[in-house]
Image (spheres, rainbow, N blue to C red):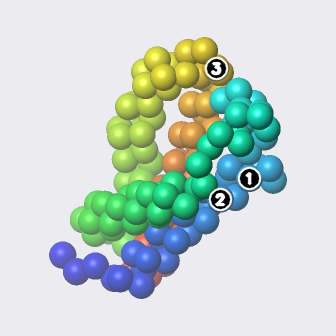
Amino acid sequence: MEVNLIALFTAAFAYFFLGALWYSPLLFGKAWMTAMKFDQINLKEVPPPTKGYIFSFIGAFLTAFALTHMTNIADTTILSHIKYAAMAWVGFIAASQMGAVYFNYLDKSPGKIFFINTGYNLVGFILIAVILALFK
């Protein structure tokens, strides 16, 4: 299968920057920090985020790469791309995070963390799907 590298990198960067916006104070950053029980005191103990940004971009790239291959088997309409992205989100993100979020964040706010984190992935997957469809 042929991969459009411009579409792939555009989608990866869009998903990466969506994360920056999603977890910023403009959208869900404050709610996420509250749900995670972060405050200014324990944030001072967190190492610089450089590695986190690198791994986040690698994850965004791999997600865009996988969705590129999944949507290559679909017709080229935006709606079909969104359908594949939504099904990937349901089957791979939402399903796997239901138990994981509860057990990993039991002492915090697992429901809120689940909706913020998986909501970001749903919107990101759809964003990637739309970008890929536009480049077809």
**37 with respect to 61 (left or right):** right
Label 2 vs 3, first from the N-terminus: 2
Q: Amino acid at mark 2?
A: Ala
Give the labeled residue for mark 3: 108
Give the labeled residue for mark 2: 20
Label 1 vs 3, first from the N-terminus: 1
Q: Quadrant of residue 93?
A: top left
Residue lying at 37% horizontally and 54% vertically, measured from the top left = 84
Residue lying at 43% horizontally and 25% vertically, measured from the top left = 100
The secondary structure type at the circle numbered 2 is helix
Q: Amino acid at mark 3?
A: Lys
Residue lying at 52% horizontally and 71% vertically, measured from the top left = 13
Alpha-carbon distance for marks 2 and 1? Answer: 6 Å
- The percent position of residue 112, horizontal first and vertical second, equals 66, 28
Which disc, if any, is residue 24? 1
The secondary structure type at the circle numbered 3 is loop
Residue lying at 43% horizontally and 77% vertically, measured from the top left = 9
Q: Amino acid at mark 1?
A: Ser
* Picture quarter with the N terminus: bottom left
Q: Is residue 7 above or below residue 104?
A: below
Alpha-carbon distance for marks 1 and 3? Answer: 20 Å
**132 with respect to 33 (left or right):** left
- The percent position of residue 126, horizontal first and vertical second, equals 51, 57
- The percent position of residue 114, horizontal first and vertical second, equals 57, 31
Q: Are marks 2 and 1 in contact (CB under 8 Å)?
A: yes
